[in-house]
Image (cartoon, rainbow, N blue to C red):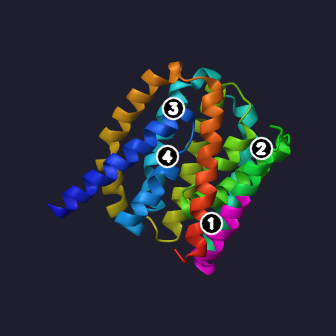
Amino acid sequence: MADLSVSFAVAVILGLGCFVQSLIGFGMAIVAAPLLLMIDPKLVPTTISMVGLTLASINAWQYRHQLSFRDLSWAYLGRVPGTMLAGAIMLVVTTQMLEIIIGTAVLLAVFASMARLNIAPNRLNFFIAGFTSGVMGTTTSIGGPPMALVLQHAEVNKMRACLAGYFVISCILSLIALGATDYLTWWHVQQAAFAVPAVLLATWLAYRVAPKVKPVLVRRAMLVLCTLAGVSTLVRGLLGG
């Protein structure tokens, strides 16, 4: 009974995160990771990455007409070495050190955006965002902020589409790396599968709400979530996990 109640709580948390991501374009891990860490640290990042793949596939299909793989190709190229580096990092570098570095990097990126520095959606920035997201997503499950910052000035549905298309490939790569480093088990598969109904319900609700949300609110919410991701990751690293 205790295991069932834990699985139900995990499903509700992941469902809430999926609602946010389907509405804004990213943010599932930012919402879910801190709460899941309190329930069981083993849930992060693997279970989130598995649910993230399901969610990204749904969102990529929903916004398929706005999806541009030409824009994403350089992000994919950056994601591969980023994921490989993350796999090596997980074997030799402490999570605490990594969280401090990542948290600082995200907050600097948010500051650059708020200071109206132009983070242009060009090849170099897509590559850097993909690389950084690969490191962050594989090690902490929070890989959305770098890509979201590059896409922040895109039309809302195009941003949602590009983020979803990127997350499909990035989650697959992360799961491969997690499997290779023994961070993916049958237990993770069970937890993710139990959450699927909550994911579907949350996504359906988000699609009903999305047309009523103004683009400026999406951008503001995106910057808030990036800030929360940076602060929470940095604080967790400074406090030692």
| Element type at mark 1 | helix
Q: Main secondary structure of the magenta part?
A: helix
Q: Earlier in the sequence, mark 2 or mark 4?
A: 4
**What residue would you read off at disc 4?**
28
| Element type at mark 4 | helix
Disc 2 residue type? Ser
* Residue depicted at x 37% and y 49%: 13
**Quarter of the figure with the N terminus:** bottom left
* Residue depicted at x 65% and y 48%: 145
Q: Which mark is residue 113?
A: 2
Percent across and percent down for residue 224 are 61, 45
Q: Are the residues flagged by discs 2 and 3 in contact, CB closer than 8 Å?
A: no
Q: Earlier in the sequence, mark 1 or mark 2?
A: 2
- Judge the density around disc 4: few (<14), some (14-19), many (≥20) Cα neighbours within 10 Å: many
Residue 162 highlighted magenta (yes or no)? no
Q: Is residue 40 above or below residue 58?
A: below
* Residue depicted at x 72% and y 43%: 149
Distance between the Cα atoms at labels 2 and 3? 21 Å
Q: Which mark is residue 127?
A: none
- Judge the density around disc 3: few (<14), some (14-19), many (≥20) Cα neighbours within 10 Å: many
